[in-house]
Image: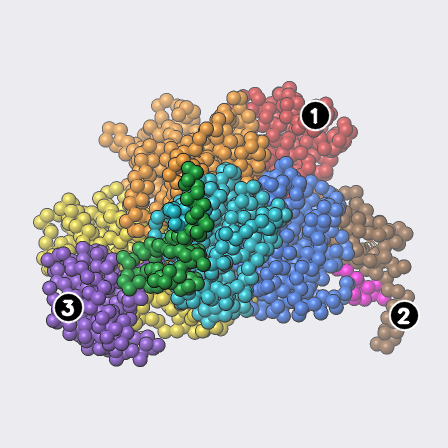
Chain colours: A yellow, B blue, C brown, D purple, E orange, F cyan, G green, H red
């Protein structure tokens, strides 16, 4: 298909439609609302289910219902609304049905504001609800990637019978960029065999998140943990830019990553040994890959002198990076909060300081130059 | 339904097929069991067992999915109507019903039930009003009677502190999306039969797509009321019914006919 | 007056006595011993055949423990035998 | 080569559409583009703005602290952006509403009576096109032809009858920008 | 006061009353309910405010209301109920008013069961709601400590105008132990000057979590982060048992810790070099102290050979321990889930294996023996 | 209130003191501003400004705490009645009132408002019904009229998909805890004066501890309705009032007297 | 017929014209130029002194921009001067 | 020295109170004690149990996999705990209800007709005391005197008139445990 100029929110919605989303339940909230609005039109046109719920609490439980009925279903919201979904998300995890959730993050805490933020990182990756579970969390940094990851989200949700989050922020949600939409997927003839459709000519199906006996609930949790382990080994996603010979590696995701990227490119063009590592799956987190980069040695000496984490929050992913690499390598941080977007030049300046601090002098200027653009 | 089983006798009553063989975890004499049984009887008689999807709620009836032999799921506390909405919207031809207690439906879940009714969501809610939170050990519910002592209203419910009993059948009858909203009781045989009839009408109404249907059933909680099962059903009659008058609070015209025809079995 | 009998699933019975309360001729009694669940179940104690098979007990039983049979009225029997003859 | 353009004015002055038009044209010429509006209840207050970036390379931040170009259609926007704009940047001022002159000498400034031009050529609503025209005369990031094509392609159907008029306003803006300057 | 035999839930409630809690709003949930029930009686007797809310969502927002009015206020719940409070908690954090929350954790995810668990660790310490904030989180391991930490919770909440969590689990909530209650604190004459009481003879007060401008919200977040940094340096709490010469250090909190403790004691009595480190404040997490213990060297050689984390979850605190010490020292884990409580003997066995694996042979038996009981 | 300011003239109307000097962020002609103004006038006239505590809600009126010169806070979306309950319970002598939109009160917040009324919580809710979600850009609300096009009901609201408009004044009037529940409109001067009177009665009722009070105000949203301010108030009159009849749905006897006496100013 | 006048806070005014709509003698007009907020405010345009000081404009103004004065009736004036004499 | 005691039976057999009584007595003698009930809807099913631990040292787990002592008042509890109980542990069986005999020979078992004794001495409800008495005869973790005191101190007021009877049942249980055995 030809590229179109698409707004992030609309692109995600349309991608979901084309990925075969049969039901959408949601509640308006800035900066996510255009997603719901697009659905309100498209789903009805296609004779699928759109319903504006009375609240995010209701929305996630409607999603739960459609999920146990075995259709591809999605909801979307932004930070405060996502907080209200925590209980429902935990039930969905506890009954192992697939569902896709979009969080277009905004500034918090509280009502905060509606500007772009990444401050739900911990909530989506580590505590999407009470109990031991992790949704798969995918973080696009362009409108095109938002489309691609939305389609992927539905496939992963079905493959693992799990929750999948697509986390964007106000910038990606509101921005228009040229992007290409996938073809329209035709809807499946029949429901999964576990789906609730009425017990016609078969044993009844039922779905619950209760396991009253501690042993039952523990063995369920063991099964769940094993599934999560499989996901961790199969579904780690990331992007590397010039990390091979980089002495300073910037680590960032989503909007922060695309901004860092322009800074990194510029410095590369000057010949500075800077690289960028962009986690695409926030859970599973690419800790192994980061450890590997840090561990990389050239004739016995580690190449990476320092890590530089850039986020639009107070340093939530930073904690995971530290857990991955330990106190060994200096890990510096730039965090903008409350809906402020870091600017390329401030990232650039900070990196220069780091180069001065940690950089390996005789290696500053690379032999071959300005190879910054392909990765 | 009476089948002749030998030359001399006919079978006039037996356990409905839509009930599983599990023993329930309910306390002796708890009329939750009665509500299950008559629901199962209706499913059998309308042969809807294979079309039905139960959305169990959080409360003593949390395990109802073990006792009713139908496709079933278990909603978060109070959210059964939302979950049922999600199911019904993608399965419009199934019989989708919730089974909720008064804490579940009238307290934490009141937003979901009202909006389901407001939308005219084509589902049925079987609402067990026992004036208390049974499962958690007898705390006050919005339906608790004035003066009633519970573990969270140890001095008896006082209107000036905690307001008045919630009349859900009446409240939901007020919404145009509601096709059928009635209150029945489970305290004796005659009323059990009427309750069953109401469930039948509600299910029929849903299958003919008339909108939201609610059957509120006054039910006993001997354990948390600190009574014997017999005393408890007595109390339903003597104390609950005066506060919660039995009756039909909303019957859309399309149904009026049916309800007239309705003969007791 | 029709005659009948009931069969109680004593292991399922919880001895709540609601059936007993509901029984017009009062032919339901508590058994002497407990069932495995620790409840004292009810039984039909009807030497004089007063059970009418009205099924009120079954209607109020929360645990669906009761099966009810009713004798066919003489007329009913004749019909049956008639039916049999036809068959 | 990357150019960042902010367009700001009252709601109703066609600020967002003007920005999208530049983005479409940029896309059609195979460039990387981003468009991002100011959003949320500030709108209610009355002023709207959007940022468009047109670049040969993939674009990082869709927002900039100091734009290369600012098109200001009302007083508040003038006050705000004449300060933020990059040194040697271009400031396009709607002189129909803004009587002041920019007090920075490290800027290139062009004054265009956008409302006047638009009204003269049919409807004041088209003032945004006059400003775009003026900007393109000074910063030929895009060919006039591409913009005209983009306009033809993306003008909402219900306004298609105004296409011709809009094109004229666009051209007039371009023309005057040639002459007027300070 | 003399010791009484007190149930954990009741002890916490009575401690709150005596700490000057003027208002309680809550919703019943096992295994926390006795707490609410005790309040329903005591608060009315004392002519204070008790109200059973219609839901946990309402409860936390009532707490928010009483908090902005400037009184000591509390709510309590268990895992699913706590999930429903996430939005309200974030608002409270965003408007910097004091409040105390009790979470008597149960098995999840979903409805799960009502048995003891520690699976809300991440939710309470890292993601108590959307946005960047951390409540102070205190984890008692005995009924007595539950009392003491509840009193402390109110003091810390007021001192820092922050949320404070007291996190127990079904075991501590349901258990009876001898304990001593504090004396009854008299209620303050007047409200804090920021409290909403009507603008009589003063400028009006107002309280909000909105900061529409990104700069405003960012500077608020900076202030918030600075406050959190102060808390991190002042309020770390923990207990050490025989860590000085321990080659294997067990790390556990709450119920898991008290169970581990009996295992550790028994092994000590056999002369095995085992120690126990028990975080009491889960946030701020005693990472520095753990790093220190691991870093401790005797003539150049590190004493600690391995860490052994024991939790009643899938390894949530484990991640923080790893972040604190890095990959350097082997960190093993025993997690029981779904409401299962680890038994001393299984912990004991595992420790023996670790001793065999990592222990420093000639040092296995300590010179002086069985000094396991005082710390 | 008319003060003689010189020999020749008297001041017959001026901006109330309980309004701050801030310019509001409301769109031109949005009657949210009118509701603020009359609320402030009542606070002045009953000299309650120093006793009042406003609980602002999430919606276009989210900043109302900037415009009313009283102690104020800002609740989570829909939870204003719960927050107000928390405040009122510890400050029983203050005038505690919420100011909520229809998305806030009738959609996400319906549980909190119904239970506040059910408890007879002694607070006042000023309820701005503009049949739409204003702040988020014009999505459907439970109060949206049938057939009304919004950004989330692009084909117009259809009863069979999304049910019927919610009548909150009527619904809340049904609860015994409610002392006063009325609907007024802000579309012209006469109705604005009646609306103000209703707010006055509600505040008086609260100060005399009569229970829960609700004043529903039909209000305009020119921006999201795509109308001029004048067209918008016209539409309130021509389209909203027929669906939402103005009137007194509940007035407890203690208040009847007052409302009779009530003369227009 | 009483006479009066209004004073409009033009910087606060958003030009919604609700006051103009409400004004019986129709003596409110839009001004020619915008205020700093970019709105075209209203002004009193009342050469024939038709404003009655009825205050309906003020009652409908969402932004509380309007102050209303009304001339005292002759009687009222006398009273005042009387009062003054007494003082 | 740490002793773990499980008491199990139907609700209404005084299981929880019996456990608390031991805990009180333990506390009064300055020992460390914990008491923890089974809780939640299992109750509804009818059986209840609690675990009491009495120890000289601080107590770790309030629950044990294999108790030192199990007092079983009904059949289901007998079936469950006769398996779980520790080798050389003590099993106290309410022989009024439980007719079976334990099939483990590594246990000390004492059979006491708790219901019978209690009914004989006034009310069947006191059966729990008979069982406690029997246990203390075999495992003197606590002096009878302390238990008697604890009973006097903690018997709910509304039952105080039954104090004497309870004490008698307690003693009788102690006495019979002396004689009966297998
Ligand atoms: C979010 C949440 N809050 C609280 C609970 C605890 N809980 C379980 S059942 C119940 C109330 C049950 O009362 P009701 O709905 O009346 O059902 P009943 O047991 O009386 O039949 C509560 C509060 C829960 N499981 N989840
Ligand atoms: C939990 C949550 N969900 C959604 C939102 C987004 N939101 C803000 S205002 C609003 C609705 C406003 O509509 P209404 O209450 O009718 O007020 P109005 O703007 O129309 O006056 C919504 C959905 C939010 N802030 N928080
Ligand atoms: S607690 Fe009450 S409601 Fe629950 S099962 Fe027992 S009797 Fe029934
Ligand atoms: S009603 Fe049923 S359960 Fe109750 S005693 Fe009779 S048979 Fe048993
Ligand atoms: S059938 Fe009728 S008469 Fe016979 S036992 Fe049952 S209730 Fe009694
Ligand atoms: S959007 Fe509507 S409700 Fe909001 S301020 Fe504008 S006109 Fe008023
Ligand atoms: S006071 Fe009356 S007459 Fe004068 S301007 Fe206002 S509305 Fe018109
Ligand atoms: S009503 Fe008020 S804001 Fe509107 S035009 Fe008149 S003065 Fe201006
Ligand atoms: Mg109940
Ligand atoms: Mg609205």
Q: Position of residue C71 (x, y in %)?
A: 86, 62
Of the pair E324 and E91, the residue shown nearer to us: E91
Residues at discs 2 and 1 both on one chain: no
Q: Position of residue F140 (x, y in %)?
A: 46, 63
Of the pair G69 and F211, the residue shown nearer to us: G69
Q: Position of residue B260 (x, y in %)?
A: 74, 67
Say which residue appears at 64% left-offset and 31% top-offset: H17
Q: Residues within 10 Å of mark 3 (few under 14, many from 20)?
A: some
Q: Chain of mark 3?
A: D
Q: Which residue is mark 3?
A: D139
Say which residue appears at 39% left-offset and 34% top-offset: E193
- Mark 3 to mark 1 CA distance (whole Å): 98 Å
Q: Judge whether residue F76 can be spotted in this image.
A: no
| Label 3 within 8 A of ligand 6 by Cβ | no
Circle 3 — which element?
loop
Q: Chain of mark 1?
A: H
Q: Residues within 10 Å of mark 2 (few under 14, many from 20)?
A: few
Q: Which residues are magenta?
A: B2-16
Q: Which residue is mark 1?
A: H160
Q: Furthest residue to the top?
A: H145
Q: Quadrant of residue F246?
A: bottom right
Q: Is residue E249 left or right of residue E10?
A: left
Q: Which mark is residue C78?
A: 2
Which mark is nearer the camera, 2 or 3? Answer: 3
Of the pair F57 and B107, the residue shown nearer to us: F57
Image-quarter location of ligand 8: bottom left
């Amino acid at each position: 298909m030809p590229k179109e100029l698409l707004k992030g929110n609309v692109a995600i919605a349309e991608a979901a439609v084309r990925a075969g989303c049969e039901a959408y339940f949601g509640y308006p909230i800035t900066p996510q609302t255009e997603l719901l609005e697009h659905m309100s039109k498209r789903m009805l046109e296609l004779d699928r289910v759109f319903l504006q719920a009375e609240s995010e609490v209701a929305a996630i439980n409607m999603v739960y219902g459609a999920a146990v009925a075995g259709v591809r279903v999605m909801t979307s919201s932004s930070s405060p609304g996502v907080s209200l979904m925590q209980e429902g998300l935990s039930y969905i995890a506890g009954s192992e049905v697939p569902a896709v959730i979009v969080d277009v993050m905004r500034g918090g805490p509280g009502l905060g504001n509606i500007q772009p933020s990444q401050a739900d990182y911990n909530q989506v990756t580590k505590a999407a609800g009470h109990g031991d579970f992790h949704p798969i969390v995918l973080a696009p940094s362009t409108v095109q990637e938002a489309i691609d990851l939305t389609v992927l989200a539905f496939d992963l949700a079905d493959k693992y019978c799990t929750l999948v989050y697509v986390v964007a922020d106000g910038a990606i949600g509101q921005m228009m960029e040229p992007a290409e939409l996938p073809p329209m997927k035709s809807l499946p003839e029949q429901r999964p065999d576990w789906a609730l459709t009425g017990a016609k000519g078969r044993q009844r199906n039922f779905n619950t998140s209760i396991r009253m006996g501690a042993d039952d609930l523990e063995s369920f949790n063991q099964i769940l943990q094993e599934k999560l382990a499989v996901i961790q080994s199969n579904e780690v996603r990331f992007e590397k830019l010039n990390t091979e010979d980089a002495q300073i590696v910037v680590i960032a995701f989503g909007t922060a990553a695309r901004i860092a990227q322009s800074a990194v490119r510029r410095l590369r063009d000057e010949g500075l040994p800077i690289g960028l590592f962009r986690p695409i799956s926030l859970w599973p987190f690419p800790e192994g890959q980061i450890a590997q980069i840090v561990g990389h040695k050239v004739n016995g000496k580690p190449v990476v002198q320092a890590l530089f984490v850039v986020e639009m929050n107070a340093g939530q992913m930073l904690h995971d990076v530290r857990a991955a690499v330990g106190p060994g390598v200096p890990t510096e941080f730039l965090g903008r909060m409350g809906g402020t977007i870091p600017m390329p030049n401030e990232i650039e300046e900070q990196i220069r300081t780091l180069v001065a601090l940690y950089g390996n002098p005789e290696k500053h200027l690379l032999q071959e130059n300005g190879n910054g653009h392909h990765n | 339904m009476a089948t002749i089983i030998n030359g001399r006798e006919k079978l006039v009553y037996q356990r409905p097929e839509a009930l599983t063989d599990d023993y329930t975890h309910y306390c002796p004499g708890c009329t939750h069991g009665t509500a299950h049984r008559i629901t199962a009887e209706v499913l059998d008689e309308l042969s809807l067992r294979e079309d039905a999807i139960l959305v169990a709620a959080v409360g003593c009836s949390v395990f109802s999915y073990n006792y009713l032999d139908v496709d079933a799921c278990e909603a978060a506390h109070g959210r059964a109507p939302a979950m049922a909405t999600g199911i019904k919207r993608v399965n419009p031809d199934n019989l989708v019903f919730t089974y909720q207690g008064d804490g579940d439906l009238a307290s934490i879940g009141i937003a979901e039930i009202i909006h389901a009714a407001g939308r005219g969501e084509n589902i049925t809610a079987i609402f067990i009003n026992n004036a208390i939170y049974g499962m958690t050990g007898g705390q006050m519910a919005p339906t608790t009677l004035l003066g009633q002592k519970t573990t969270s209203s140890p001095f008896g419910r006082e209107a000036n502190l905690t307001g008045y009993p919630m009349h859900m059948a009446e409240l939901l009858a007020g919404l145009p999306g509601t096709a059928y909203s009635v209150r029945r009781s489970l305290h004796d045989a005659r009323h059990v039969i009427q309750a069953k009839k109401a469930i039948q009408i509600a299910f029929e109404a849903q299958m003919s797509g008339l909108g939201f249907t609610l059957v509120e059933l006054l039910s006993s909680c001997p354990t948390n009321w600190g009574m014997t099962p017999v005393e408890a059903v007595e109390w339903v009659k003597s104390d609950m019914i005066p506060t919660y008058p039995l009756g039909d609070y909303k019957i859309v015209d399309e149904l009026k006919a049916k309800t007239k025809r309705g003969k007791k079995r | 007056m029709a005659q009948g009998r009931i069969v109680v699933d004593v292991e399922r019975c919880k001895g709540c006595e609601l059936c007993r309360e509901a029984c017009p001729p009062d032919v339901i009694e508590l058994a002497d011993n407990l069932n495995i669940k620790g409840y004292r179940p009810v039984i039909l104690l009807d030497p004089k055949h007063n059970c009418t098979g009205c099924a009120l007990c079954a209607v109020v039983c929360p645990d669906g423990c009761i099966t009810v049979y009713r004798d066919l009225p003489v007329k009913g029997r004749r019909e049956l035998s008639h039916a049999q003859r036809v068959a | 080569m990357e150019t960042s353009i902010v367009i700001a004015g009252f709601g109703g002055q066609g600020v967002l559409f003007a920005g999208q038009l530049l983005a479409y044209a940029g896309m059609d010429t195979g460039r990387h583009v981003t468009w991002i509006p100011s959003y949320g209840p500030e709108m209610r207050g009355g002023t709207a703005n959007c940022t468009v970036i047109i670049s040969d390379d993939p674009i990082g931040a869709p927002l900039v602290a100091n734009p290369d170009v600012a098109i200001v259609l009302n007083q508040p926007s003038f006050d705000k952006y004449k300060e933020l704009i990059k040194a040697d940047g271009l400031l396009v001022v709607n002189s129909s509403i803004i009587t002041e002159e920019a007090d920075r000498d490290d800027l290139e400034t062009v004054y265009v009576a956008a409302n006047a031009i638009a009204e003269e050529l049919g409807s004041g609503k088209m003032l945004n096109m006059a400003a775009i025209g003026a900007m393109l005369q000074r910063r030929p990031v895009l060919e006039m032809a591409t913009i005209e094509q983009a306009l033809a392609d993306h003008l909402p159907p219900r306004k298609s009858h105004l296409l011709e008029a809009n094109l004229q306003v666009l051209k007039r803006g371009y023309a005057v920008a040639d002459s007027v300057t300070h």
